[in-house]
Amino acid sequence: MATTTADTHDMIPADAQGRPYAVAATFDSTSDLLSAIRSVRKKGYRKLDALTPFPVHGIDEALGESRSKLGYLIAAAAVVGILAAQFLQWWTAAVDYPLIIGGKPFYAVEFSIPITFELMVLLASFAAVFGMLAFNGLPRFNHPVFNYSNYSRATDDGFVLVVERDGNHFEPSAIVELLNGLGGKNTEVVHEDA
Amino acid sequence: MADLAIKPNTQLDLLETTIDQPLVTGIPTYHSVTESVSSIVEDRPTRFWFILLAATSSVMLMLFVMLGYLVATGIGVWGNNIPIAWAWDITNFVWWIGIGHAGTLISAILFLLRQRWRTAINRAAEAMTLFAVACAAIYPVFHTGRPWRAVYWLLPYPNTMQMWLNFRSPLEWDVFAVSTYGTVSLLFWYVGLLPDLATIRDRAVGLRRQIYGFFSLGWRGSANHWKHYELAYLVLAGLSTPLVLSVHSIVSFDFATSILPGWHTTIFPPYFVAGAVFSGFGMVLTLLIITRKALNLEHLITLKHIDYMCKVMLATSMIVGYSYATEYFIAWFSAVDGERFAFYNRITGPYAWAAWSMILCNVVAPLPLWWKAVRANITLVFIITIFVNIGMWFERFVIIAISLHRDFLPSSWEYFHPTYVDICTFIGSMGLFLTLYLLFIKFVPMIAIAEVKGAIAQDIEKGAHH
């Protein structure tokens, strides 16, 4: 596929697409991507995203991203799991339905541990997985970046840098030039769906 | 990745991967990894695959017929009866649960230990965990005779009988342990799959694209996605590590908290966990040796992976053998007649053939793995893994049936004979396992594409730039 430039979007009928969403370019290696991110940020662009086939070490620092807050949610879920398991075992066996079995106490910390542990793990895992999806806004089946003609390389062997529209001030041609200068390939303006 | 903090390690990693057997052979690129894994899912299934599927699903059908017969008739169609109230059903349950342990061990513990070699085998091993847990769940659920009513006495829910469960029983702990294990393994597996399903989606067209698009949940590979994803994956690994150790510990409590000689021992939790890992690696090796050959994946699942898995198998075999010895020592040292009799009877009584088969398969057969030449010989490794699979089944049978068959009153002594329903149900559960595995390798990327790329990124980019 030939390297396209800013005028790509002019070749497609303008009424078929929405307003420009971002400029995207593909890089061939993680190091090229990281140095491109740093250069673009130096130019003052802040709304950046990178689409990569695997997690790239150091990309959050380069993008200026904070650490994930997911851990707090998981910790809270784990505490809920512990409390729920303790309440379940104490209330059902010692309060609501006390039954003498083998002369054992109705409730004791010792025998409540296995189920407490399992429920903690279960709820924390739910929080990790569904929290991760929620934080990422998934499932979401349509997204403007899917309109990037070279998108499929982002889950194969390409490292895509996306410079998103930041407010109303958006000059695609300047960004295209910048990304091409940094070695970006298939640089093009990505539009929202019409 | 090459220009960041991990640079000092790059040299070491290259040394490790070039001097010894490499993790990925040939000259890989990101694209070649995508190609070789995706093509398995994308190529038309071969005639051989269809023949295998027809065979395994016929065996699976036998399982369903047997279970239908059991439900329609009653659990008397199984051979277990007092005193051997637990026989093949619980033996098979523990055997299958044990097989499931390798998947989570590989995906969780080796992940936390930063063992990069796991990436080529973790997906398939995790899938085996799920299928093994599904096979295991059949036995306790159908042992209730009326599986749709099992919920009454398995799960706590407010009911019109105003009864609650007995949380003092390890059998109830088992319900929580196994169901949590199954659920968390499924989540762990699916989270790992998301980026790879997106890879398949982006290569597909038409209906396939829609289906893989649906299951990949719209994954974009955005840096923000990966940020939360990596934390979620790390936490899941951290949670699964104690979980996998807890599951077989709790399974062993089913026996250890009873007062039966042969069961009532404190060594059971670690002994069961080591045995589970041992049998799990046995089964993973058995299937992966066949799979890598059949699907031409020798460059991704290399001799190095097989070598490492053999070492884990050898180590756990030693632990299992040591546990056998400890059991005998403690039986003698305790000076308890019942305990001494149980263990003397185990190796000299009517079931001596089972006990000696267990020792031969689990302790003696893996010994050749001490030699590197044996670990590099795929045929020998395959034969040893078959011994391990059989031996670990015997271990559970020995513990369960031999301990039960000599009741406290000699008038109740009995010898267990499986019925044809026992046998066909067990063989049928293997059909279910293999059918699910065959469907898995054809429809799901069986090697973690994103993880393999991450693991070899330094090597690839170093090669490309210099």
Image (cartoon, coloured by chain):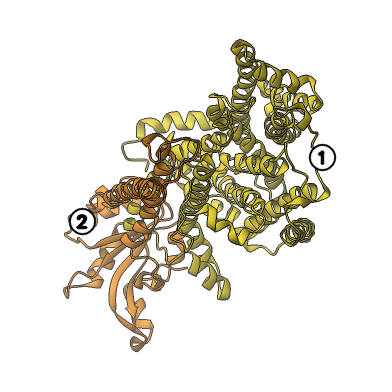
Chain colours: A orange, B yellow
Which dot, 1 or 2, sits closer to the camera? Answer: 1
Left or right: B403 as drawn, with respect to A6: right
Q: Secondary structure at mark 1?
A: loop
Marks 1/2 same chain: no
Across and down, in percent, residue B302 comes to: 62, 38
| Circle 2 residues within 10 Å: few <14, some 14–19, many ≥20 | some
The alpha-carbon separation of the residues under discs 1 and 2 comes to 75 Å
Residue B9 seen in render: yes
Please identify the quadrant where the C terminus of chain B is shown.
top left
Q: Secondary structure at mark 2?
A: helix
Residue under numbered circle 2: A41
**Is residue A168 placed above or below B132 in the rendered structure?**
below
Across and down, in percent, residue B80 comes to: 74, 43
Q: Is there a contact, CB below 8 Å, between mark 1 and mark 2?
A: no
Across and down, in percent, residue B47 comes to: 78, 61
Please identify the quadrant where the N terminus of chain B is shown.
top left
- The amino acid marked with disc number 1 is His
User: Residue sitting at 68 percent across and 51 percent down?
Assistant: B433
**Closest to the observer: B27 or B345?**
B345
**Is residue A165 placed above or below B427 in the rendered structure?**
below
Residue under numbered circle 1: B417
Left or right: A121 as drawn, with respect to B248: left
Q: Chain of mark 1?
A: B
Q: Chain of mark 2?
A: A
| Circle 1 residues within 10 Å: few <14, some 14–19, many ≥20 | some
Residue B465 seen in render: no
User: Residue sitting at 17 percent across and 75 percent down?
Assistant: A168
**Is residue A169 placed above or below A80 in the rendered structure?**
below
Which residue sits furthest bottom?
A: A15
User: Residue sitting at 59 percent across and 13 percent down?
Assistant: B334
Across and down, in percent, residue B79 comes to: 78, 45
- The amino acid marked with disc number 2 is Arg
